[in-house]
Amino acid sequence: MSTLLLTHPSSLLHEMGEGHPECPERIQAVMDHLQAEDFASLLREVASGVTLEAMLRAHSVRYVKALDACAPQEGYFEIDADTCMNSSTWPAAQHAAGAAVHAVDAVFQRRAGNAFVAMRPPGHHSGQESAMGFCFLNNVAIAARHAMASHGAERVAIVDFDVHHGNGTQEIFYSDRQVLYCSSHEMPLFPGTGRPEETGHFDQICNVAMQAGDDGAALREAYREIILPRVHNFAPDLILISAGFDAHKHDPLGNLMLEADDFYWVTGKLCDLANRHCGDRVVSLLEGGYSLEGLAQSAGAHVRALMGR
């Protein structure tokens, strides 16, 4: 079956000021790369919006209302030194979360084999009641809870290879035995969470801390020895990927030394597990990646692996 590519024009309108690394050009770089002939068979759709019901599966009513109230008509509303809203941020965040739901529906309804959501803002730093680290709504958490609520998924595995730990995702699922959260990330680095001893209330959190300078060989060893066996043993009904490409060697916000082929390898291994356990169902959501060239090459390799090419 086809790989679904989801995006929405709102991703190009959200911005947080001149020189900010989480910029509209990120999506443009990915989408330009995916115009190549290698990607001609992608099933391309425009993302849907998100319902309040879907947002409230991962976030509190108070938080969602606060985001809506903070959205400025013009200029910027600053949440913290790194994270702010312009007039297009709230629609973009809702479309990014809506795309996650859309993608889950597509793979469970067998309209696509798997899916890549090329949307921003990213989401894995957003907690139940917090925006931070360029994130407003936790897209992967909303996707996981939607799979359980609407499609009867009993076990969802989230694998996060962003260079930064997904503290928001970990927080949301820390007491949820139905969700396995596995993260490989650089430490010490923002946001400072993700120590191996953070294991969740049911030993369903798996953090692999990497060090500055670690390369693809170190990543592959971590996945072979720790993360892939955890996902296999969990036998999920769906695999979600927080696909951050800021572990690329050229990224300005991280110090790992991964190359595009490393993301291809990890994605292929996760697709193999999806084939074994959950009818090939994989939904991947774009997180970080701030070298435009590194992001485009890495996302392209990731999508090729999803396509089985």
Image (cartoon, grey):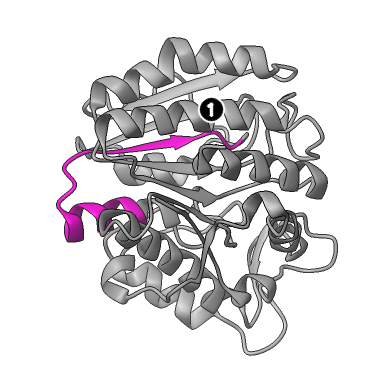
Residue 29 in sight here: yes
Residue drawn 71% across the image and 60% down it: 35
Residue 48 placement, left or right of 292? left
Residue drawn 30% across the image and 61% down it: 105
Q: How many marks?
A: 1
- 9 shown above or below 214: below
Residue drawn 20% across the image and 52% down it: 148
> Is 95 or 297 nearer to us in this picture?
297
Is 49 magenta? The answer is no
How far from the left and from the top, in percent, is residue 187? 62, 24
Residue 224 placement, left or right of 147? right
The residue at the far bottom in this view is 73
How far from the left and from the top, in percent, is residue 39? 63, 53
Is 155 magenta? The answer is yes
Residue 89 placement, left or right of 235? right
> Is 57 or 160 nearer to us in this picture?
160
Residue drawn 71% across the image and 70% down it: 15
The kind of residue on which mark 1 rests is: Val
- 180 shown above or below 92: above
Q: Which residues are magenta?
A: 142-162
- 221 shown above or below 19: above
SS of the residue under disc 1: helix
Q: Which residue is mark 1?
A: 266
